[in-house]
């Protein structure tokens, strides 16, 4: 009879408390750094003039992701995305509660996570900061297109309206501007990393360190070289423009219930402008721009609204662009800008082409209703227009991009390629209260001014309205929720920047570089795995051969072993 012996585990020595704490700190360092890099990116955006924070943010992100496996890069990237987008997009829940805000930030953070997965994948390549910055631009390009037409809010370029890199917008638009910022940040990290390695070992060749320094310095040098592209010269004369901000009776979504009061506010402020012109207090404008939703009463179907607009436009005596909501008997609503002539009334219209999902129309309404009962505040969906918006106002061709459209590269560029000498971005921020949204959007408009070398006029219902010169400087600006009329003489320009001429080509080139880097990294990974398999097979074969020889020698006896030797 035999007994089975059960091994008894002998506990090892207890781990010192200090060692446990150090291990926990080591494990949490990168996740904390990932979230901190996202928070620093948020702080680099307006209304704070801290654009330079984007550089240490990407340097820290480089430390977080370099050498990580792609799966770890995805998780760390999700933390970066949440640290960045949760505070940046908090205004989306200003009047409808936290659910839409949290859902949007979570979904958009997945795009950042996927981007950081790609950054981790290319981080072992030579000159990895170049590929990593291109991967970031690729991620922004995808996020700007899907789902539901994309959501470009938070593109790195839009945080650089006050930064030294801004002239690069004229070179290649927001993709090149964003690429430069990310490259500089990753390059700074690589310089520090290689300098520390060289100091510790004394064996690092100077070539990699020089390449890293080039990644950090080339964007700054490129921005300086691009300065001649930024000009406020009046190539086609000047125009005196007025932007009217009528204000709304109260904050929040319920301002829509006071449509007549909003219209009256804008008409009254326009009539006050006419009185100021007559008294010589301000120069006479060549044309007047009202904001988006300045008349939510359809002037084609509502005689009272038409009469109010007619009276105001005749008082000021110049062409006026009115933001109206058109309500046809059937079909979708239209978010429309109407060119109103003081003698002939409405003479041309532009329908907003990129309507806002979950704001102006509700995709998957029955599903969304489960999570947010406020979805039915949008009781009838808006539909998109198809024609490019360019009005001829007193001889000046004015390109139109309504509010949300300013975030999309194509929606602004094609007005310039269709002959616009000046741009207008009428907006309505009343539903977002006193949040940072209006400043974030104003920064976009400043970037667009430099990108296309055009004056940009931003009339807003409740603020901040502004007049922006082609170099991105604001020359007139209103206060929030204060009636105002901004008047300024501005330059008109017809030359096309490289960014305008090339359109999507710079973004496509950077996307191709990113895909090439990802393909290279994948090929290196496959080769490394195959090499490991071959090495393992060789070791296993050698072990099997040795074992077989041992068995043969044992069977043949000591003499055979001696003969073999």
Image (tube, rainbow, N blue to C red):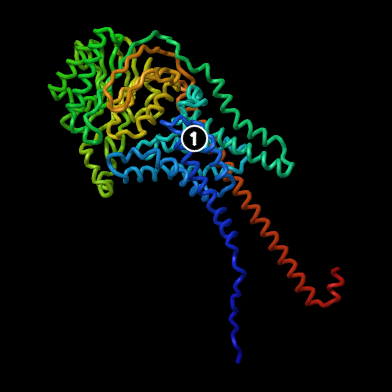
Q: Position of residue 177 (x, y in %)?
A: 50, 28
Residue 420 visible somewhere in the drawing: no
Name the residue at 40% across, 42% down.
86
Q: Residue at 51% x, 49% y: name it.
A: 31
The quarter of the displayed image where residue 374 is located: top left
Q: Tell me what residue is drawn at x 24 percent, y 25 percent.
A: 294
Horizontal side, residue 94 vs residue 562: left or right = left
Residue 421 in picture, x, y percent from top left:
38, 15
Quarter of the image holding residue 476?
Answer: top left
Q: Is residue 28 left or right of residue 251?
A: right
Q: Residue at x 61, y 46 (%)?
A: 524
Image position of 13 with respect to 300: above or below: below
Query: Residue 200 at what x, y percent from top left?
Result: 71, 44
Query: Left or right of 121: which side holds 445?
Result: left
Residue 346 vertical placement versus 176 (above, below): above
Task: Specify few, some or many for label 1: CA neighbours under 10 Å numbering under 14, 14-19, or 20 or more.
Answer: many
Residue position marked by numbered label 1 in the rendering = 137
Front residue of this view, candidates 308 and 381: 308
Q: Quadrant of residue 394?
A: top left
Q: Is residue 526 visible?
A: yes
Quadrant where the C terminus lies? Answer: bottom right
From this view, report whether residue 338 is shown above or below residue 29.
above
Q: Secondary structure at mark 1?
A: helix
Give how far across and how far down residue 461 sits, in percent: 27, 26
Indicate the quadrant containing the N terminus: top left, top right, bottom left or bottom right. Answer: bottom right
Q: How many marks?
A: 1
């Amino acid at each position: 009879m035999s007994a089975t012996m059960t091994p008894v585990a002998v506990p090892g020595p207890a781990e010192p408390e200090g060692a446990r704490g150090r291990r926990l700190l080591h494990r949490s360092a990168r996740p904390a750094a990932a979230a901190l890099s996202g928070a620093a990116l948020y702080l680099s955006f307006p209304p704070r003039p801290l654009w330079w924070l984007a550089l240490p943010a990407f340097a820290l992100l480089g430390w977080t992701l370099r050498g990580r496996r792609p799966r770890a890069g995805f998780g760390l990237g999700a933390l970066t995305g949440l640290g960045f987008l949760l505070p940046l997009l908090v205004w989306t829940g200003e009047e409808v509660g936290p659910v839409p805000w949290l859902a949007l930030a979570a979904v958009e953070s997945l795009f950042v996570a996927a981007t950081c997965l790609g950054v981790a994948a290319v981080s072992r390549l030579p000159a990895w900061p170049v590929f990593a910055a291109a991967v970031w631009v690729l991620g922004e390009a995808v996020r700007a297109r899907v789902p539901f037409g994309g959501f470009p809010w938070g593109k790195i370029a839009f945080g650089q309206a006050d930064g030294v890199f801004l002239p690069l917008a004229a070179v290649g638009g927001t993709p090149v501007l964003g690429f430069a910022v990310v490259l500089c940040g990753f390059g700074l990290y690589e310089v520090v990393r290689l300098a520390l390695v060289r100091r510790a070992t004394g064996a690092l060749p100077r070539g990699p360190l020089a390449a890293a320094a080039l990644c950090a310095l080339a964007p700054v040098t490129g921005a300086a070289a691009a300065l001649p592209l930024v000009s406020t010269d009046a190539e086609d004369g000047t125009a005196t423009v007025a932007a009217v901000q009528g204000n709304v009776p109260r904050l929040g979504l319920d301002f829509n219930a006071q449509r007549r009061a909003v219209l009256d506010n804008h008409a009254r402020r326009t009539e006050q402008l006419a009185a100021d012109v007559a008294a010589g207090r301000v120069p006479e404008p060549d044309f007047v721009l009202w904001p988006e939703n300045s008349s939510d009463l359809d002037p084609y179907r509502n005689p009272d609204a038409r009469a109010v607009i007619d009276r105001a436009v005749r008082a000021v005596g110049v062409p006026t662009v009115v933001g109206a909501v058109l309500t046809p008997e059937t079909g979708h609503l239209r978010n429309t800008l109407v060119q109103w002539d003081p003698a002939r009334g409405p003479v041309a219209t532009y329908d907003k082409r990129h309507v806002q999902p979950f704001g102006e129309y509700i995709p998957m309404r029955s599903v969304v209703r489960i999570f947010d009962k406020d979805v039915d505040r949008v009781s009838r969906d808006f539909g998109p227009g198809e024609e490019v918006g360019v009005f001829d106002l007193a001889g000046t061709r004015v390109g139109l991009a309504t509010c949300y459209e300013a975030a999309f590269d194509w929606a602004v560029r094609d007005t310039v390629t269709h002959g616009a000498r000046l741009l207008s971005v009428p907006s309505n921020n009343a539903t977002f209260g006193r949040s940072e949204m209006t400043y974030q959007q104003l920064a976009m408009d400043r970037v667009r001014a430099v990108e296309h070398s055009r004056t940009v006029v931003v009339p807003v219902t409740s603020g901040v309205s502004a007049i922006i010169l082609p170099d991105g400087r604001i020359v007139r600006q209103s206060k929030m929720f204060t009636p105002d009329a901004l008047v300024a003489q501005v330059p008109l320009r017809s030359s096309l920047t490289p960014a305008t001429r090339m359109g999507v080509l710079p973004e496509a080139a950077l996307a191709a570089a990113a895909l090439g880097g990802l393909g290279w990294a994948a090929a290196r990974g496959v080769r490394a795995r195959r090499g490991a398999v071959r090495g393992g097979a060789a070791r296993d074969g050698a072990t099997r051969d040795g074992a077989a020889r041992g068995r043969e020698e044992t069977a043949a006896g000591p003499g055979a072993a001696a003969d073999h030797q």
